[in-house]
Image (spheres, rainbow, N blue to C red):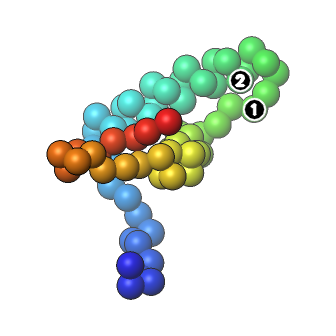
Amino acid sequence: MSGKKMPVTLRLSDTEQEAIRQKAIEINRLLVKQGRQPVRDSELAHKILELSVACVALTPEGEIVIER
């Protein structure tokens, strides 16, 4: 790419926000059971991006997928 930075903000749809919120609730329940600090929704979203960006690929049909 041209070395330009991406915008600082990322707009999420209501459905995407709710999915992250629900996943954060699930993860935070487990963290609390382990005696650990819960994570904020935004922290979870950042971690998801950090871990998944390297796994994004394009199929021969032009579909964007996440590979393991």
Q: Are marks 1 and 2 in contact (CB under 8 Å)?
A: yes
Decide if residue 2 is on the left or right side of residue 51.
left
Decide if residue 48 is on the left or right side of residue 61.
right
- Sort mark 2 into few (<14), some (14-19) or many (20+) by Cα contacts within 10 Å: some
Q: Residue furthest left?
A: 61
Q: Residue 26's x, y, as percent?
A: 55, 20
Which residue carries the number 1 mark? 37
Look at the image and tell me whether residue 42 can be seen.
Answer: no
Residue at horizontal 44%, vertical 83%? 3
Look at the picture and state if 12 lies above or below 9. above
Decide if residue 29 is on the left or right side of residue 20.
right
Residue at horizontal 44%, vertical 78%? 5
Q: Residue furthest top?
A: 33
The amino acid sitting under disc 2 is Leu
Q: Residue 65's x, y, as percent?
A: 33, 42
Look at the picture and state if 9 lies above or below 59. below
